Image: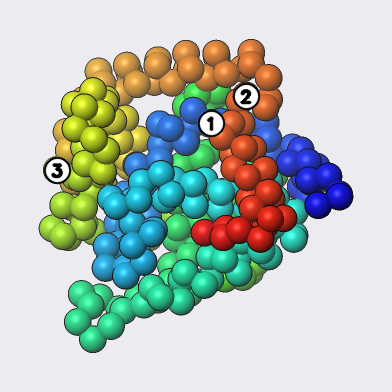
Amino acid sequence: MTQPLPDPSALDADPEIDIRQYLDGAAGFFGAAANVIMQLSNPPVGYGVVESPVESGNVMIRPVKRLRTTLTYLAVALLGDEADRAAYRAAVDAVHRQVRSRAGSTVRYNAFDPKLQLWVAACLYWGARDLYERMHGPMDEYDADAFYRHSARMGTTLQVREEMWPADREAFERYWAENLARTRIDPAIKAYFEDLIDLKMLPRPFQLAFGGMHRYFVTGLLPQHLRDEMGMSWSPRQDRTLARLLRVVGAAEGVVPESVRSFPLNAYLYDMRLRRRLGLRLV
């Protein structure tokens, strides 16, 4: 305990890009549930989560812990150094060993399947890029390519191999279109999503105060195919209103310090490093 804690700003980052300029704390607030729906619309991923025996990772039972685990993973993958990623991979792997289909499972799944992890990472990249561009406008080609390459870490921090990440953005768009078209939302998964959207994991006053607004953002940020799967309606007028709102938030974020803009990811990275130093559980 005599050495200072690592500074989260001392990043092992791609020299071509300062990833911190593309991290928006507000984006996580707006897009988290929509991204979960994207990920879990791949049936093996969805049933792996819904049928998981790991109670501590169930957002409907432990919402605060689940939020910390997910955001810490993103912080470590995007901002962390090799030691951070190795430590968090080991912690996540210990949990993932329990998540695999059994005799009575609806579909076959294994949390160590790199193809399923690739889909999850693709959803995270697509959602992060989509929200950034809604809030701040398109990236230039150079930064868009660099951001795309760096985002591979959202998969390779676990079992996704480097060569599995589509070679470039054009290849990614083909992968995304093909795999999004294959997604489906079964009734059991839809019921889980409805509870998530309505914030059923939170006390009743929070559900009443924020449930409607949460549903609005989730609906607006889903790809149309998944809106159709969920039976959601979304009008051009709603889309224009959402676009204006996100640009206002983006403009406000443009004038705040970087440390504020990237909160809470920077805080979760610091928390993970502190936990690792003290020998506490990471997941």
Residue 246 horizontal side relative to residue 171, left or right:
left
Q: Nearer the viewer, mark 2 or mark 3?
A: 2
- Which class describes the residues within 10 Å of circle 1: few (<14), some (14-19), or many (20+)? some
Relative to the observer, which residue lies in front, 121 or 261?
261
Residue 56's x, y, as percent?
38, 59
Secondary structure found at label 3: loop
Q: Which residue is mark 1?
A: 25
**What's under tag 2, amino acid-wise?**
Val
Residue 193 badge: none
- Residue 109 in view (yes/no): yes
Q: Which residue is mark 2?
A: 260
Secondary structure found at label 2: helix
Q: State which tag comes first along the sequence, 1 or 3.
A: 1
Residue 245's x, y, as percent?
40, 16
Q: State which tag comes first along the sequence, 2 or 3.
A: 3
Whole-angstrom CA distance, mark 1 to mark 3, is 29 Å
Residue 256's x, y, as percent?
64, 16
Q: Which residue is mark 3?
A: 231
